[in-house]
C-alpha cells in the first residue's frame, strides 16, 4: 500500500516535471547531422529553442534507449560560446523509457527569447559491415541504423536529419512511408548526404505514445573507403622515476579490424599486386599514423615475435611545458603492423617510449607536492577503444596521493607495484575505462609527496646488499677452509 | 570540474620537475662511484684480520654506500629508469 503510494507519488513528480518542462520551451528548428565513420559516428544536433516563459534556464535533451546505449561521449554547447555547458547526469524516465539530460543555460531566457544549443555525441558500434564477409579485393560497405525523429519533450516546428558519409557512395537508404508531418518527399539524397525531412509541427515526442505511433527506423547502406580500426584492449603503464627524471609510457594494444570478415584465404600474391599498382583495398589495415608527444626518446615497438622494424618515426624536439612555443608539436609515427590486418583479424603489439619528466611533471614548493600529467591514451583517429586500463606507477615512498581524471572512470584502484631495486614497492593507480573515442583524449593529473628519505631508499637498499657481501667476506677470511692442515694457506 | 581546471592551472604554473642530480651527469657519477667501490673493495681485501674488525667495517660501509649510489646511477644511465 505504502509502496504503491510512493510509486504513484514518484510518477506524478516525473509527469509534473515533464509537463512543466514541456511548457517552458519550444523548438523552432532541430537539425541533426550524423557523420558516418568506420567504428565511430559523430552526431551533431542543433536545437534552435525559444523560451515560452520568463526565467527559463533548464532545457531537457532526450535520448532514446538505443541512442543512450550507443553514445559514449556527449557535450552540449551554446552557440557563440566555446565552453561546454553544465549537464546534469542522465536519469532514466521509466514511464516513457527515455533518458533525460538537463542542461543549465548560463543566462536565463525571457519569454520569446531564442538561442541555439549544439549537442555533440559520438556513437560507438552504431555501424556494422554489410555484407558481413568480403573477399580480399571486395568493396567495404557498412550499414548505419537510427531513428527517424529526434525526440524532444517540447513542440518542434521543423526538424530534419542529415546522414553524411565520407565518400559519395550511398548504396541504399530507407524511404519511410506514412509520414504525417510532411507533404513533400520524406527523404532526399545528394552526393554523400541523405536528408530526412523537413518535418513540420511535431508534438512533444519524448513519450511512449509518440514512439509507438510515429517513430520509424531508417537504415543507410554506404561505402567506406578507409579500414575500420578498433582497439579491443589497451593497457597503458606510466612509470615515474625521480632519480632518472623520466616518465616511461608503455602501451599494450590489441588492434582489430572491424570491417567485413575475410572470405576465403589471404592471397599474398593478390596483396602484392595491390601494393604494386597502388590500389589499396579499403578492407585492409596496412598502416596508421600515431601522434606521439614531443621530446620522447628510446621508442620501442615489438610484438610476441620480437621487434617490428616496419615503421617510421619522426621525432619532435622537447617542448618544456612552461614555454608556450608550440604546444601542438607531435612526434609522428607511421605504425605498420608486421602483417596487413584484414577484416576480422587482430594484431597485438607493444609500443612505448621514455620522456623527460620535466615535460609532464612539476613541483609545487608551497605544498611540497609533485604534480604529474599522464595522457589517457594516444588517439587513433576514428577508432573506438573497447577496454582501456591506465596504470600510473608512482615513485617508491609516495604519500598523500590525489588523482584528477578528466572524465570519470568505470573504477579505479590503488595497488603496489614492484620493479627493479624496490623494497616496499611503489603505489600504482589503475583506472578502468570502457568505450573510449577520439574525443576522450584527456590528461590524468596525479599529485603526491615524496619525503627526502624515501628518495634514498633505493641506494640504501643496494648498499645493504653490498654490506652483506662484505660481512660474508669478513667471515670467509677468518675461517680455515683447508682440507689438509699441513698445506700452507 | 572546477577541481580539474584548478589542478591543470597549477600544473602549468608550477616550476618543472628537476631532479637532485642532473641526469646528464649520471653516467660519469656512476663511473666514479663504482670505480671508488672497486678500489675500496680491493683495499678491504688487503686489511689485516683483527679480532674487533673496526677498520674493515668502516671501509666496508664506505664502499657499500658508494656502491649503492653507483648502482642506482648505473641503472639510470643504461636506460632502466628506476
Image (spheres, coloured by chain):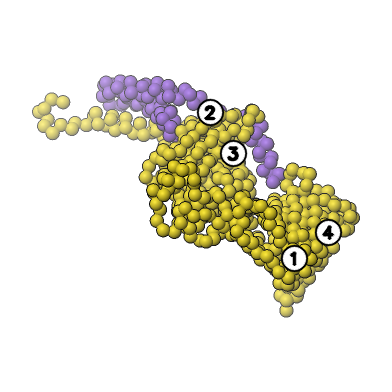
Same chain letter for marks 1 and 3:
yes
Q: Quadrant of the C terminus of chain A?
A: top left
Q: Residue at x 36, y 22 (%)?
A: B35
| CA gap, disc 2 and disc 1 | 59 Å
Where is mark 2, residue-wise?
B19
Parent chain of label 2: B
Up-down: is A358 above or below B4? above
Q: Earlier in the sequence, mark 1 or mark 4?
A: 4
- Label 1: which secondary element: loop
Q: Quadrant of the N terminus of chain A?
A: bottom right
Label 3 or label 2, whichever lies nearer to me, is 3
| CA gap, disc 3 and disc 2 | 17 Å
Q: How crowded is the residue under tag 2: few (<14 C-alpha within 10 Å), some, or many (20+)?
A: some
- Viewed as shown, does residue A251 lie left or right of A161? left
Q: From the rendered image, report the letter of the chain displayed in purple.
A: B
| Nearer the observer, A41 or A187 | A187
The numbered dot on residue A25 is 4
Q: How crowded is the residue under tag 1: few (<14 C-alpha within 10 Å), some, or many (20+)?
A: many
Where is mark 3, residue-wise?
A373
Parent chain of label 3: A
Q: Position of residue A151 (x, y in %)?
A: 73, 62
- Label 2: which secondary element: loop
Amino acid at each position: 500500500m505504502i509502496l504503491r503510494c510512493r510509486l504513484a507519488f514518484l510518477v506524478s513528480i516525473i509527469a509534473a516535471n515533464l509537463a512543466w518542462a514541456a511548457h517552458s520551451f519550444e523548438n523552432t528548428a532541430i537539425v541533426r547531422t550524423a557523420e558516418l565513420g568506420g567504428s565511430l559516428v559523430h552526431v551533431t544536433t542543433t536545437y534552435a529553442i525559444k523560451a515560452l516563459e520568463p526565467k527559463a534556464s533548464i532545457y531537457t535533451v532526450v535520448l532514446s534507449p538505443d541512442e543512450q546505449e550507443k553514445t559514449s561521449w556527449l557535450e552540449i554547447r551554446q552557440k557563440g560560446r566555446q565552453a561546454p555547458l553544465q549537464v546534469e547526469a542522465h536519469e532514466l524516465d521509466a514511464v516513457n523509457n527515455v533518458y533525460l539530460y538537463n542542461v543549465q543555460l548560463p543566462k536565463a531566457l525571457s519569454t520569446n527569447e531564442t538561442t541555439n544549443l549544439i549537442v555533440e555525441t559520438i556513437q560507438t558500434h552504431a555501424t556494422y559491415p554489410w555484407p558481413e564477409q568480403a573477399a580480399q579485393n571486395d568493396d567495404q560497405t557498412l550499414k548505419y541504423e537510427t531513428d527517424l525523429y529526434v525526440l524532444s519533450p517540447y513542440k518542434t516546428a521543423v526538424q530534419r536529419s542529415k546522414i553524411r558519409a565520407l565518400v559519395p557512395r550511398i548504396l541504399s537508404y530507407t524511404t519511410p512511408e506514412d509520414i504525417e508531418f510532411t507533404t513533400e518527399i520524406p527523404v532526399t539524397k545528394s552526393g554523400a548526404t541523405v536528408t530526412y525531412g523537413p518535418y513540420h509541427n511535431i508534438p512533444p515526442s519524448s513519450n511512449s505514445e509518440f514512439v509507438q505511433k510515429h517513430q520509424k527506423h531508417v537504415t543507410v547502406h554506404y561505402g567506406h573507403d578507409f579500414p575500420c580500426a578498433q582497439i579491443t584492449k589497451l593497457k597503458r603503464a606510466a612509470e615515474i622515476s625521480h632519480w632518472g627524471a623520466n616518465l616511461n609510457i608503455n602501451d599494450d594494444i590489441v588492434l582489430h579490424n572491424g570491417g567485413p570478415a575475410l572470405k576465403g584465404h589471404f592471397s599474398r600474391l593478390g596483396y602484392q599486386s595491390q601494393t604494386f599498382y597502388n590500389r589499396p583495398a579499403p578492407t585492409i589495415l596496412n598502416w596508421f599514423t600515431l601522434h606521439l608527444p614531443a621530446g620522447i626518446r628510446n621508442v620501442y615497438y615489438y610484438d610476441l615475435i620480437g621487434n617490428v622494424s616496419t615503421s617510421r618515426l619522426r621525432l619532435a624536439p622537447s617542448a618544456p611545458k612552461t614555454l608556450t612555443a608550440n604546444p601542438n608539436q607531435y612526434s609522428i609515427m607511421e605504425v605498420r603492423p608486421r602483417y596487413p590486418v584484414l577484416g576480422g583479424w587482430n594484431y597485438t603489439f607493444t609500443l612505448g617510449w621514455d620522456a623527460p619528466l620535466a615535460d609532464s611533471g612539476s613541483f609545487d614548493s608551497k605544498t611540497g607536492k609533485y604534480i604529474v600529467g599522464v595522457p589517457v591514451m594516444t588517439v587513433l583517429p576514428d577508432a573506438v577503444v573497447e577496454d582501456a586500463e591506465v596504470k600510473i606507477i608512482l615513485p617508491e615512498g609516495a604519500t598523500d596521493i590525489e588523482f584528477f581524471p578528466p572524465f570519470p572512470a568505470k573504477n579505479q584502484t590503488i595497488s603496489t607495484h614492484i620493479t627493479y631495486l624496490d623494497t616496499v614497492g611503489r603505489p600504482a593507480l589503475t583506472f578502468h575505462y570502457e568505450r573510449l573515442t577520439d574525443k576522450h583524449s584527456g590528461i590524468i593529473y596525479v599529485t603526491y609527496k615524496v619525503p627526502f628519505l624515501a628518495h634514498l631508499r633505493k641506494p640504501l637498499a643496494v648498499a645493504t646488499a653490498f654490506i652483506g657481501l662484505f660481512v660474508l667476506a669478513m667471515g670467509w677470511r677468518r675461517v680455515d677452509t683447508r682440507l689438509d692442515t699441513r698445506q700452507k694457506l | 570540474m572546477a577541481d580539474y581546471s584548478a589542478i591543470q592551472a597549477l600544473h602549468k604554473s608550477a616550476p618543472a620537475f628537476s631532479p637532485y642530480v642532473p641526469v646528464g651527469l649520471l653516467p660519469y657519477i656512476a663511473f666514479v662511484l663504482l670505480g671508488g667501490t672497486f678500489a675500496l673493495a680491493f683495499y678491504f681485501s688487503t686489511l689485516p684480520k683483527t679480532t674487533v674488525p673496526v677498520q674493515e667495517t668502516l671501509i666496508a660501509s664506505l664502499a657499500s654506500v658508494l656502491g649503492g649510489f653507483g648502482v642506482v646511477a648505473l641503472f639510470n644511465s643504461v636506460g632502466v629508469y628506476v
